[in-house]
Image (tube, helix red, strand yellow):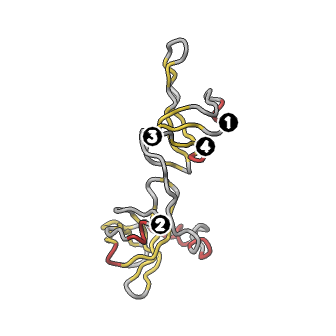
């Protein structure tokens, strides 16, 4: 295995679990290290845009048969997010506490939700089990007081929601 190879996590050790990684997480080798270790940029497919840079054993990942395009490799090398300072800070995936069909409550009164007629305390259901830029799709659809179906499925910041048990 070498730099920029695409790998998949195939052995989920406790140390990796503690970083919120999961089996079959895909990543890109940033650096080959001594003692059969690799520094890998793992991509979180549950929160699109989230990543973690983790040192793993070579035996814990499997090289994929696909390669990164040269343009992408150059972009990675020049990325501000991947500066040495940032790499040394970001070792865990963010944890998405929501699952598809979870019942949730809107806990924030905000103009961006008011334009859809939603207020703090509105109840909805998670429509998908992943987030993009820390927002998740929530279905607030209901039958209004006139018996009309009000289809209200919108993207909500995950910090503006709480799960209702």
In front here: 27 or 22? 22
CA distance for labels 3 and 1: 21 Å
In front here: 32 or 77? 32
Quadrant for the N terminus, please. bottom left
State the residue position of label 4.
Answer: 160
In front here: 69 or 142? 142
State the residue position of label 2.
Answer: 19
Category of crowding for the residue at label 4, using alpha-carbon neighbours closer than 10 angstroms: few (below 14), some (14–19), many (at least 20): some
Secondary structure found at label 1: loop
CA distance for labels 3 and 4: 15 Å
For the residues labelled 4 and 2, say whether their Cβ atoms are less than 8 Å apart: no
Q: Quadrant of residue 66?
A: bottom left
Q: Which mark is residue 140?
A: none
State the residue position of label 1.
Answer: 109
Residue beneath the point at 45% across and 53% down: 46
Residue 42's spot in the image, x, y percent? 45, 66
State the residue position of label 3.
Answer: 102
């Amino acid at each position: 295995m070498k730099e920029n190879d695409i790998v998949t996590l195939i052995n989920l050790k406790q140390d990796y679990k503690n970083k919120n990684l999961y089996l079959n997480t895909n990543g890109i080798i940033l650096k080959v290290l001594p003692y059969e270790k690799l520094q890998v940029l793992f991509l979180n497919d549950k929160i699109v845009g989230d990543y973690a840079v983790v040192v793993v054993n070579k035996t814990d990942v499997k090289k994929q048969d696909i390669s990164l395009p040269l343009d992408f490799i150059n972009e990675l090398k020049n990325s501000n997010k991947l500066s040495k300072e940032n790499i040394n800070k970001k070792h865990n995936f963010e944890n998405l506490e929501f699952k598809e069909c979870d019942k949730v409550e809107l806990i924030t009164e905000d103009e961006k939700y008011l334009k859809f007629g939603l207020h703090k305390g509105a109840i909805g259901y998670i429509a998908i089990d992943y987030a993009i830029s820390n927002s998740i799709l929530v279905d607030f659809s209901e039958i209004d007081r006139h018996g009309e179906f009000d289809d209200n499925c919108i993207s909500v910041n995950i910090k503006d929601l709480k799960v209702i048990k």
